[in-house]
Image (tube, rainbow, N blue to C red):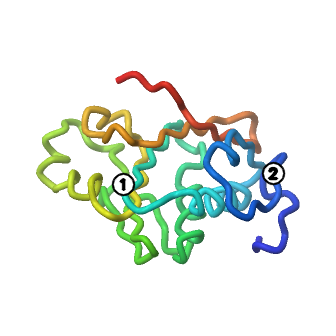
Amino acid sequence: MGIGSAAGWFIGRGIPDLMSLDDLLPAETTSPEATMALGEQLAGALRSGDVLALYGDLGAGKTYLVKGIARGLGGQPEDVTSPTFTLIQEYATNPPLYHIDVYRIEQLPELERIGLGEYLHGNGICVIEWPERMEPMLPAHTIRLRLTHVDENRRRVERVKGWNR
């Protein structure tokens, strides 16, 4: 689905020219393609140094959202895969996109050893799946999104505000 076909991207939203996260969220998507389209629009609201934490169950659409973010930053969505076994995937986008999946991490020292702090405080955009496993390491400016199953085909994406560590 391309930029020119806004209908069906995500429920209740058209193509924004320049929107903030609060303009785009909450939103519901009806397909993986619609979740990617939302991610593409979210990319326009992200800046170098942003950290985006994605909370949600398996199958909630986290990786599809990252595919859309990559596309919105000039990358190829088909290059984006869940980095569950590699921990970090780097994509040559503008700014660079760092896709981090800490599902298999059991202890924070593992993340410190691989230099995760350099990504979290660098000039790229970090998107983290399963961030609850590394909460103490997340910067104060982290943007938190929750993805939930509404029903078999619909997903809800909303910003989590007022986070207490």
Q: Does dot 1 land on a helix, a strand or a loop?
A: strand
**The C terminus is located in which quarter?**
top left
Q: Does dot 2 land on a helix, a strand or a loop?
A: loop
Q: Which residue is mark 2?
A: 13
Q: Is residue 79 above or below residue 138?
A: below
Q: Nearer the viewer, residue 104 or 139?
A: 139
Type of amino acid at the residue the image marks with label 1: Ile
Residue 100 numbered mark, or none:
1
Q: Nearer the viewer, mark 2 or mark 1?
A: 2
Q: Residues within 10 Å of mark 1 (few under 14, many from 20)?
A: many
- Residue at image position (81%, 51%) is 13
**The N terminus is located in which quarter?**
bottom right
How far from the left and from the top, in percent, is residue 12?
Answer: 84, 46
Q: Is residue 21 above or below residue 82?
A: above
Type of amino acid at the residue the image marks with label 2: Arg
- Residue at image position (45%, 75%) is 93
- Residue at image position (82%, 57%) is 14
Q: Is residue 110 left or right of residue 19?
A: left
How far from the left and from the top, in percent, is residue 151?
Answer: 75, 35
Q: Is residue 12 above or below residue 5?
A: above
